[in-house]
Each structure stands twice: as C-alpha cells, then as structure tokens.
Image (cartoon, rainbow, N blue to C red):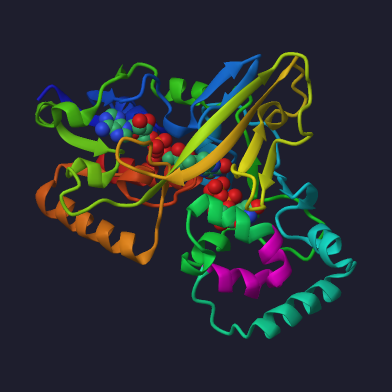
C-alpha cells in the first residue's frame, strides 16, 4: 500500500496524528473536505486580527501534558475568558459568581448568596435533579436559571431545558468569590497568531489534499493505506445505515467595521434572553490583549437544527443519541478493524481541545 496512514480530516485530531506519524517516518496522507486545513479551530487574518472563523476557541486545561504539547507549536497569550451575559439590555457577570449574585439579589457576602440559592432550591422541591432545568435550579436557584440559563440553553440546543441532559450545565462553574474567569483551569490562553499557524506547523512536510471528501470515493481511499484515522462523523461513514445521529449546526454572521475600534468592550457577549435570535456575539480583537488595529471584526453565532449536508458542530449527547452511537461503535469494531474513529465527530463526544490533544497523544502512543 502507498501509505501507512490515511488521515481523514485536518482538524486538531488529524493534524496531531499526522505530525507524530511523520516524525516516526511513517508515510501519511491527510485528506480534508473543506478548502482549508484546521477544522473548527481554523483562524483567518482579517484586519490583522486572527479571526476565529468557526466560533470562539479558548485553550484551557488542567493537564500539563496537553498544555506543554500545544505550546510546542505556538506562543500563547494570557487571554482569560470572562464573557458577559446580556439579558434584555442588562449586563451580568459570568460564570455565576459573587458579581452575578450581587446584581441579581443585591447580596454582598457568600453566605447571603448561598442562603438565597438554598431558599430557591428548597421552594422548587428538587432533591434529585434529572434534567438540565432541575440541575440548574439546584445549582444556582430559579432567578439565575430564568435570566442566564433558560433562554440561552434553549436557543443553543433547540429544546426545553427539562428535556436536556444535566451534564451540559455542569461544565459551567459556580463560584462564591468575585471571579469572572469562566474556566476553572490551571492553564489558559490563545495562540498569539491564531490557531491556523499551529496546524500549519503540525502538517509541515505532510502530504495534504484539501477539497477532498472521503465519502466520494470511500473504497478507493481505503485501498491506499494500512490504517485510517477517521475524524469525520461516524454515522456518515456508514451512510447512516443505523439511523442519523443528532447534531447542532451553527450559522456565523460576520461584520467588519473599518472605522469603529471597539464594538462591545469584550471578546464574548452571550445573549441569554429568548427574543434575540443569536446566542452570542464575538469581538475577535479582544482575544489578543494589547493588539492594536484599526477597525474591528464581530461575529454573531446562531444555533439551529442540523440536517444532512450542514456542518455538524455539536453532538447532542442525550441517551437516545448515545445509544445509537454505541451501535455504530460496535459496527465499527466488528467491521472495520483498520479504521480508528476519533475526534469530536468520530467519537461523537463534546470534547474540548485539551481532551482532543490527550486523546490524539494516546492514539499515537498505542497505534502509530
Ligand atoms: P474538527 O475540527 O471538526 O475536524 C474534523 C475535520 O474533518 C474537519 O475539518 C472536517 O471538514 C473534516 N472532515 C469531516 N468529514 C470528512 C470527510 N468525509 N472527508 C474529508 N474530511 C472530512 N474547545 C475548547 O477547548 N475551547 C473552546 O473555547 C471551544 N470552543 C468551541 C466553540 C465552538 C463553536 C465549537 C463547535 C467547538 C468548540 N470547541 C472548543 C471544541 C473544539 O472545536 C474541538 O475540540 C476540536 O476542534 C475538535 O477537533 P477535531 O479534529 O476532532 O474535529
Ligand atoms: N450556558 C448558559 N448560559 C450562558 C452560557 C452557557 O445557560 O450564558 C449553558 C448552555 O446550556 C451551554 C452550556 O452552558 O450549552 C455550556 O456552555 P459553554 O460556554 O461551555 O458552551 P460552548 O462554548 O461549548 O458552546
């Protein structure tokens, strides 16, 4: 066979595996259906600002191996994510912390805030939260649920919070300190020149074909390599033969301002009411503290139901989809011993970038 490894997809997963395989003198081909490399972490320079084309990406981790690994490919800045929530024109601090509790209830001490939450939790009668709504009320009380969670979450996931799994909200910290840092992470930042530079470095010396969709000539591609790392959607690989997994897709609406230098005063503004049709607005220059440019670039993010042909951005990891995924996984294990399904789409998991790095390192250690 012509190659040791065929890698389908040039996102972070595919790029790390390709890089490590090449370092070990393996013959590697990467194919990518988009016109560019990088997957969803792709950034593009507009007005000298590395713009996050597929949504805001902040690297954050507690794992030193993941942090050290990614830092081999770029210098990272000191950006700390502190989004603000805009609810009908009122601004609130995120994640939920003493500033938020003060704005909503006028309380000034952690004890008062805990008492308020306890009071609201008690009056809701929830003891064993079984869905996102119950989980949110137990964590932060009904007021915060109504103002900062309900509208945003229902726009983001397209269904009532009472029908969503609780784990989605567990990602968000609740703090009884005056701390607007969104992530509880030891390491955090953004590559100073954007993410595309990282992917370019990883793929240096690797044969890459863009505008090349594996599904258009599956058997031909399969005959090229001993092993395939497949980072596309697992249900698409099997032509949806067991059914379609659910995803959320996103639409990005970009505006470039030539004269305005500061549009919203922050990198991320979440719109948590249900009337505003978009979920968040990103002003890219604020991801790069100290960057001085003329003009600014702003992106609005709209979330909607995914249909075949749309980009699948978020897996919807409820029990129905997870059990369908398990069936695909069993099919893959029994029928495709030479294909390793990996990444956010291949494993149908809501992985952050640090988890992607660790999983790719694992695959390299055991397979490459
Ligand atoms: P992808 O980046 O999706 O790459 C898969 C690639 O495979 C794509 O380029 C695709 O075009 C290609 N492909 C698919 N099918 C085929 C085919 N048939 N043939 C050829 N090519 C194919 N993580 C964080 O840590 N911090 C954040 O702040 C953060 N923000 C996010 C915001 C948004 C809006 C989204 C959607 C995700 C965010 N993430 C964040 C998660 C992060 O994007 C992922 O962890 C990471 O990009 C996954 O990399 P991947 O290589 O697995 O997948
Ligand atoms: N969330 C919310 N209000 C917010 C921000 C987030 O209710 O202002 C909820 C929402 O359900 C979202 C989840 O918390 O899907 C996780 O948020 P995160 O910012 O981690 O989402 P991501 O960046 O992955 O889209």
Tell whether 254 sits left or right of 338: right
Can residue 67 be seen here?
no
Q: Residue at x 50, y 23 (%)?
A: 196
Q: Is residue 133 magenta?
A: yes
User: 50 or 159, which is in the foreground?
Assistant: 159
Foreground pick, 115 / 250: 250
The answer to whether residue 168 is visible is yes
Q: Quadrant of residue 225?
A: top left
Q: Quadrant of residue 212?
A: top left
Estimate the x, y position of residue 48 in percent, counting from the top left. Answer: 65, 14
Q: Quadrant of the C terminus?
A: top left
Residue placed most toward the observer, 48 or 300: 300
Please state which of residues 66 and 311 is positioned toward the viewer in this rendering: 311
162 relative to 302, above or below: below
Q: Is residue 142 magenta?
A: yes
Span highlighted in magenta in the image: 132-147
- Res. 50 image quadrant: top right
Q: Main secondary structure of the magenta part?
A: helix
**Percent of width and height locating residue 96:** 72, 60
Quarter holding the N terminus is: top left
């Amino acid at each position: 066979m012509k190659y040791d490894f065929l890698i389908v997809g040039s996102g972070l997963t595919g790029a790390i595996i390709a890089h490590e395989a090449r370092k070990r003198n393996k013959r590697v081909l990467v194919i990518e259906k988009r016109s560019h490399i990088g997957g969803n972490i792709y950034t593009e320079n507009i007005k000298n600002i590395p713009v996050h084309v597929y949504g805001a990406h902040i690297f954050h981790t507690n794992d030193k191996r993941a942090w050290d690994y990614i830092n081999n490919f770029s210098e990272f800045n000191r950006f700390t994510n502190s989004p603000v929530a805009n609810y009908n024109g009122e601004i609130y601090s995120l994640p939920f912390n003493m500033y938020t509790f003060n704005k909503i209830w006028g309380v000034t001490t952690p004890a008062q805030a805990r008492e308020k939450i306890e009071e609201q939790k008690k009056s809701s009668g929830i003891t064993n939260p079984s869905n996102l709504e119950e989980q949110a009320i137990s964590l932060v009380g009904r007021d915060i649920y109504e103002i900062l969670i309900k509208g945003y979450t229902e726009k983001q996931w397209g269904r009532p919070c009472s029908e969503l799994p609780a784990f989605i909200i567990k990602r968000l910290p609740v703090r009884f300190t005056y701390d607007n840092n969104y992530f509880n992470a030891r390491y955090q930042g953004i590559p100073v020149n954007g993410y595309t530079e990282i992917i370019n470095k990883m793929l240096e010396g690797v044969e890459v074909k863009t505008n090349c969709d594996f599904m258009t000539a599956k058997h031909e591609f399969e005959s090229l390599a001993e092993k395939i790392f497949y980072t596309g959607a697992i249900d698409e690989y099997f032509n949806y033969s067991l059914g379609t997994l659910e995803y959320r897709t996103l639409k990005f609406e970009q505006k470039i301002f030539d004269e305005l230098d500061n549009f919203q005063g922050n990198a991320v503004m979440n719109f948590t009411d249900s009337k505003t049709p978009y979920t968040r607005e990103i002003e890219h220059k604020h991801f790069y503290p100290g960057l001085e440019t003329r003009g600014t670039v702003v992106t609005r993010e709209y979330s909607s139901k995914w249909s075949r042909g749309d980009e699948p951005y978020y897996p919807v990891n409820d029990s129905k989809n997870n059990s369908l995924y398990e069936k695909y996984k069993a099919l893959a294990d029994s029928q495709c011993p030479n294909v390793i399904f990996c990444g956010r789409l291949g494993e149908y998991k809501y992985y952050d970038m640090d988890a992607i790095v660790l999983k790719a390192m694992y695959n390299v250690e055991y397979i490459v």
